[in-house]
Image (cartoon, rainbow, N blue to C red):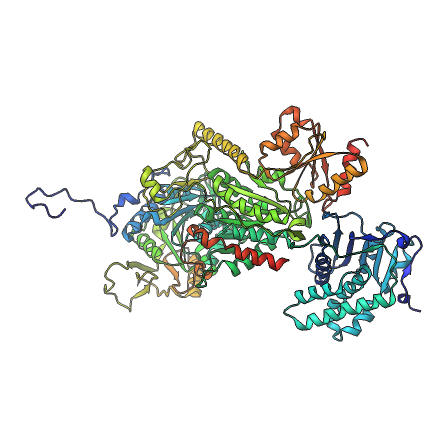
Amino acid sequence: MATTPTSTPAPPPSPKTNRIGLQVLDYRGGKTTLCAGCGHNAISERIIDAFYDMGIQPERVMKLSGIGCSSKSPAYFMSRSHSFNSVHGRMPSVATGATLANRSMMGLSVSGDGDSVSIGAGQFVHLMRRNLPLIYIIEDNGVYGLTKGQFSATADVGSTLKTGVINDLPPIDICALAIELGATFVGRSFSGDKRQLHNMIKAAISHKGTVMLDVISPCVTFNDHEGSTKSYKYMKDHEEAIHEVGFVPHFENIDVDYDPGTTTDVRMHDGSHLRLRKLNTDWNPKNRIAAMTALHESNERGEVLTGVLYINTEKPNFVDLLNMTEEPLATLPEKTVRPPKEVLDKVMASLM
Amino acid sequence: MATSDVAVQSAGSRSDQKKVVNDFSIQVATVNGSGSQSANNVLLRSIFRMGIPVSGKNLFPSNIAGLPTWYTIRASKHGYVARKKEIDFLIAMNPETAKEDVTSLSPGAAVVYDEPLNLQSLRSDLTFYPVPYDKIVATVCPDAKLRKLVKNMIYVGVVAQLLNIDMARVEKEVEKQFAKKERAKQLNLAAIHAGYDYAKASLTKADPFSVEESNQTTGKIIIDGNAAAALGAMFAGVTVVTWYPITPSSSVVEQLIEYLKRYRVTPDGKATFAVVQAEDELAAIGMVLGAGWAGARSMTATSGPGISLMAEFIGLGYYAELPGVIFDIQRVGPSTGLPTRTSQGDILFCATLSHGDTKHVLLLPSSVSECFSMAIEAFDLAEKLQTPVFVLSDLDLGMNNWMSDPFAYPDKPIDRGKVLSKQDLERLGGFARYKDVDGDAIPYRTLPGTDHPAAAYFTRGTGHNEKAQYSERGDDYQNNMERLDRKFETARTLVPKPEIVANGTSKIGVIAYGTTDFAMKESRDQLTNEFDLKTDYLRLRAYPFTREVHEFVAQHERIYVVEQNRDGQMLSLLKLDLAADQVTKLRSVRHYNGLPIDARSVTDDIVSQEGK
């Protein structure tokens, strides 16, 4: 088509596309039905941007969720990806089955603090242990939204409901839990921290194991008041980024300068680089014990540490451990999955 | 003179009676964990090798070691393989239960017992054979630590001598069982011979029971139902297996793992399957449905308590239309119940499992051969119908050894159901996930990874319309539920048809299913021979009931539904399905003491209800 004379008027500028020729529109979903200002909507936007930027074919992604406001959100991004909104607290098992059925797919799961840390604590724990290749985002607001404002298990001691009820049970720190259990990429972010979350999701896409991102995502209707520790204001005052999260995708020039003195470089599985630039603290993201200690200390201080808390790019994931064939199990042909008659004859003979 | 020098022959024994050949039951009463399983297996298989139809049943406690266990072997020239109520030949090894075991025998039975137990004083109408096990074992097993295990083999020798079991066959079985353990083989063989020699020298045959070479088992195999189901699953092309250990289902997956490791690995050493031991049954079924959704042939195996936990997910599977196969090896409920005893107690629960209006396909194997063939059918049905399918076996079938003809290799290719490919979508332009296109109420689906912008859809347990969009509209909900109902009608035409034995003149029809079938041939023979009651018989093989079931009920005046639960669960399902004027024909025969149903109990119940 480039052979036509140049005298014709210039065509209208083609819409911006990513490295696989898709527009950001191709990553959009249905119109959100969540409240205006809900942190979850901002997270959906970051997911759209990150998958667009990374040039991930939407058809190669499976979206998975449980039940709750957070779990509705997969309907609001990437409509061209298959999606499975399952049952309350049990999405990890569905994600596990789906991933084993088709290892070539990228799993992107969204859950909430109620879905993952109360009813789903059992499945969450075992998902982390298995290090299944999966991005697991918890949209964490410390409260049950759909049932109108009860405390969840991530609500801090002393935080209050809108009605004034004070929480007197200790919170479960999902990040410390995930690190303890064996997740290989654990981060905490804030739905209002656009740049950090964007880069963390891009890094998550490049990781080959369980990525657990706890994203504080204020509930504007039930938990954004004075007395809440999951409000926009509280996060503004208490967020403590442990480093600046930078990311250089594998398809870009990796030779971007960085100062090894102030920046930790993590080479990701796909050749991308996670660049963590030191802020106030020295943070070695490969040290589990130090990460857990720091998390517990920050909880004592009432600070919310954000950033890539822990990463391990070496540990084999669950799919590796199962020694499965490269071809997805879902589409193996009959000749591969049904042994020939000679095998049955042999087994029968052994039973005679 | 030691009491063992001669057989203690009591008055009233049947020594003067006619010989009873190839038609008796042996019970070995022992202690869990004492290693009697090998001995019992050798006995069972030796009789089998002599061409005599046998069945073996292990009645065991929910315990690792130390509690009473009974193993019964039935030899039947008639081919009856159900549990026989009466024990003819008791091998009393357990001091704890010996007294009760002997007390419950019918007159004329024989007892082989450990001499110090002094059981001969308990009854005068039995034949007693004392065996000084400790003395004999000391001569063949110098290692005191091994004596406990070897001791059991002595009774194999004693019984072989008393019942005339061919020793060459016994030896062959021992060699087979201990093929890779030379020392164990020698020790066990020595113990058997010592038992045999002792019996020959010191016991006088005084009971009527014996075996004679026959040809009724030629070409047959012996296998347990769980292994058969595992084999079926492998040949069905299962790719994702998830489970949580629970008696009596664990050996389905344990044996499946062995088969898969041997026969489902690519030349470069890669697995064409994934097996996950899940954290609980909730996760096991979640993984099954996730895998089924993404296109795998997925399954789990469990028992009652696991089914209870799976209820919520099964509702999702029904409503979101996800394939998956659930093997329920039924045990006795409710709650933990009797974990090592058998029942058909999950029928009604599985048929309508989960909240809301739900109905599920149940397959009802009644032989090891059907455990195999129905496993294969279950995977095809689950994908064809896009719904969870249950295979309802039970402990009796699953964990006991059964004779069978060798299994037939599947004669049909794998049927993956209505799945649209990229090319289909290019042709169609798009699709509506829950639309009834073909009039059979089965919609089309796509698999994640289908490379077409219109391939994706949103799977959910919330209300949805034909396009899989979220909907709370009453008409959308109702249309969808009615289509699901119609889909169940389609299932009615696809599930295995019942097996019917009818002479066309009987007024009485009997309906049974699963392991109840083992007792039915024998019971119907008893009814005919002893009470002149001729019956027709229908063996259910699936739910929903096919047309033939309705016809069978219509053709008879009275229908006895025989099953192994308290509440007549299949009877309840039949009542839901039959017209009001047919329902009044139904009568119920139930057996639910945890032991496999026996023919005599069925016969007595029917005779009593017939007013005979």
Q: In this rendering, is residue B576 above or below A193?
A: above
Side (left or right) of B46 relative to B111: left
Q: Residue furthest bottom?
A: B142
Task: Provide residue B276's location: percent of width, then percent of height.
Answer: 51, 55
The residue at the point 57 percent across, 43 percent down is B390
Give the total of numbered labels.
0
Residue B272 percent coordinates (x, y) = 46, 56
Image-based side of A188 in relation to B22, left or right? left
Looking at this view, is A83 or B224 the one in front?
B224
Residue A244, given in percent of the width and then of the height, sits at: 30, 59
Task: Answer above or below: position of B505 versus A213.
Answer: above
Q: Furthest residue to the left?
A: A7
B524 and B64: which one is in front? B524
Q: Assign the C terminus of chain A to one quadrant of the image.
A: bottom right
Instruction: Write down the quadrant of residue A175 in the picture.
Output: bottom left
Residue A155 in view, yes or no:
no
For this rendering, which residue is in front, B43 or A329? B43
Residue A75 in view: yes
Q: Quadrant of residue B3?
A: bottom right
Q: Position of residue B200 (x, y in %)?
A: 84, 66
